[in-house]
Image (spheres, rainbow, N blue to C red):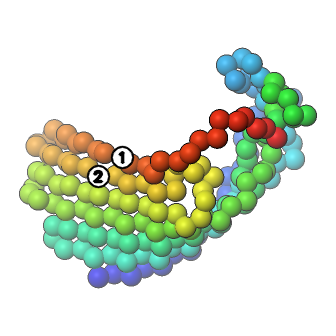
Amino acid sequence: MTIKGGVSTGFKAPTLRQLSPDSRVTSCRGGCYIDGNPDLKPEEIKTLEILWQRQSEKNRTELVLFNNELDAFVNKVSLNNTLDQATFQNVIKESISGVELAHRSRVSDSFEWYVNATSLFDQPINPSYRRFASAGLLWRYMKTRISSELIWRQAIEVDNHFSHG
């Protein structure tokens, strides 16, 4: 059995296209424009993780608790409440915490299966990723590898009203 902890930080600088006020990108299948914004700040993330792992010759199980602090994430926003012109702004400041569970089992030298599940404690930026899981099978023979995977996401209600700004 192993217990590990980790803390990390990172950032992503805006692209030149996102920063340049002289940059205009055609978007929305030609129906709108996105202008650069020289006032953008770098996106930042701080992550804290605690991992519990149990491993044997044929099996590995992991449980991870995590917290991600997202700050100044860049998103496209409408200008003047119009649908035809937008710019980039640092609008997303979120805290996302959750738990991940993963298990992998080798049945033989050529066959293994795995399952993964994630549940977020907070409402994520994209609600369809609040709870999701996957399961798969993997078969190997010499240089041939065949796999199959099933992915599940919790159903969500979709608001059909468009809002901008």
Hey, what amino acid is under mark 2?
Answer: Ala
The residue tagged 2 is 135
Residue 36 visible within the image: no
Viewport quadrant of the N terminus: bottom left
Horizontal arrangement in the rendering, residue 125 relative to residue 89 (left or right): left
- Name which residue lies at 65% across and 35% down: 160
Position in image of residue 36 (x %, y %):
82, 35
Mark 2 surroundings: few (<14), some (14-19) or many (≥20) residues within 10 A = some
The residue tagged 1 is 151
Position in image of residue 80 (x %, y %):
91, 34
In the figure, residue 25 lies in which quadrant? top right
- Name which residue lies at 16% across and 70% down: 57
Q: Residue furthest top?
A: 30
Hey, what amino acid is under mark 1?
Answer: Ile
Mark 1 surroundings: few (<14), some (14-19) or many (≥20) residues within 10 A = few
Local SS, label 2? strand
